[in-house]
Amino acid sequence: MSVETITLGCRLNFAESEAMRRGANPEDDLIIVNSCAVTAEAVRQTRQAIRRARRERPEARIVVTGCAAQLQPQAFAAMPEVDQVEVRDFTAPLTVAAGFRQRVRSFVAVQTGCDHRCTFCTIWQARGPSRSLPIEAVIEAIAREIDAGAQEIVLTGVDVTSYELDGIGLGTLCQRILAAEPRLQRLRLSSLDSVEIDAPLFELIAGEPRLLPHFHLSLQAGDDMILKRMKRRHSRADAVAIVERLKAARPDTTIGADLIAGFPTETEDMAANSLKLLDDCDIIAAHVFPFSPREGTPAARMPQLEREVVKARAARLREAAAERRSRWLGSLVGTQQRVLIENHGKGHSDGFAPVHIDGALRGHTGIARIVAHHGDHVTGVRA
């Protein structure tokens, strides 16, 4: 008997999966599949994971939850491998979801839901309206994770920059966390909506070394017309300006970004604008998604591109992003980086470069001298 979680999708899902695992009866023979619906491919992978789980543990009870189950409960309930589908009650009180992914790094959910209506997205339907957790509950959850061995906390949510409760935004939340928990030396933020970064957060970025300087931005495109058709709330110039402001506040800032290739009506010139955004925003960690029409969204009703074109543009964007990332990793050779080892001698720098240090133990943190670049990681030695 055992309780197993299979998690697809975002960091919020990982935090919620761990909370569900901890809350389950350890004597149960149970598999919880926490699904993702961000793309059609994510839904396909969820179904695939369910079938594989049934083959590997034929006697276990399989419960499916998460965004894909929320949007398509009947379809998942009809799968012969599934014993139960759990859907969320958006009116129920929120509880903090927190838990380990690599033991020494823990994700803590401070917000869920979304009030925006990007034309390509169904997550607002799957997650409901934006809701935020009380500061006291968040701080208590972080204290528990630190007590259990976490050395780095990642604040996560569906739209974490929309955190707001009793007039307190994300920046003030981070300030309160760091003031309340001096044991916490590494605080990260998950994906940010650049237009929602508030003044207190910029203040922290500029002056608080415990807030780590890697910021993953939800940019989605680099062309103003496509951004407008996506119903995003920023322009291309806004994206470039926010990165310039981040780097001015904290020169060692590194930038990640979500980008969609092949959005409906995208021309070659529009696609080229997204390609150039990699350089203009100094993006060193791009998550590139080929556009996937989601049923019921405005974007699914727009004139679609041929799938071959979408795939080709995604491949081109990924290749360019990989080249930039490789150059960045190579530029770290000879530098000193503060690193947290997460598992088997592997960890990340403050700027989220993957670093391997032979013989380093899980939980080790300190300064490493970077001596080589291999593929998608660098090798370091203790300085």
Image (spheres, helix red, strand yellow):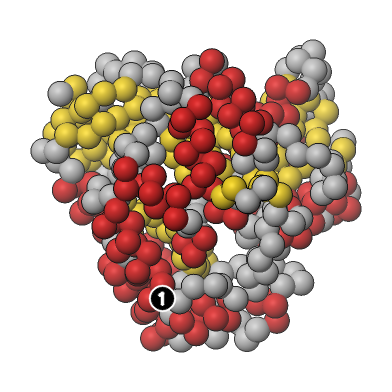
The answer to whether any part of residue 296 appears in the image is: yes
Report the number of numbered marks: 1
- Secondary structure of the residue carrying numbered label 1: helix
Q: Is residue 223 above or below residue 333?
A: below
Taking 174 as reference, is 352 left or right? left
Task: Find residue 319 and report its image quarter.
Answer: bottom left
Whole-percent x, y for residue 267 in the image: 46, 86
The answer to whether any part of residue 46 appears in the image is: no
Whole-percent x, y for residue 290 in the image: 52, 66
Whole-percent x, y for residue 271 in the image: 41, 79
Q: Is residue 323 above or below residue 361?
A: below
Decide which of 203, 38 is in the foreground and name it. 203
Taking 133 as reference, is 78 left or right? right
Tell me the residue at 69%/62% (across/down). 115
Whole-percent x, y for residue 142 in the image: 56, 27
- Seen as rendered, the residue at the extreme left is 334
Task: Find residue 241 and report its image quarter.
Answer: bottom left
Tell me the residue at 39%/52% (across/down). 202
Decide which of 263, 169 is in the foreground and name it. 169
Taking 174 as reference, is 353 left or right? left
The quarter of the image holding the N terminus is top right
Residue of label 1: 236
Please state which amino acid type lies under the numbered disc 1. Answer: Arg
Tell me the residue at 55%/81% (across/down). 228
Q: Is residue 79 above or below residue 305?
A: above
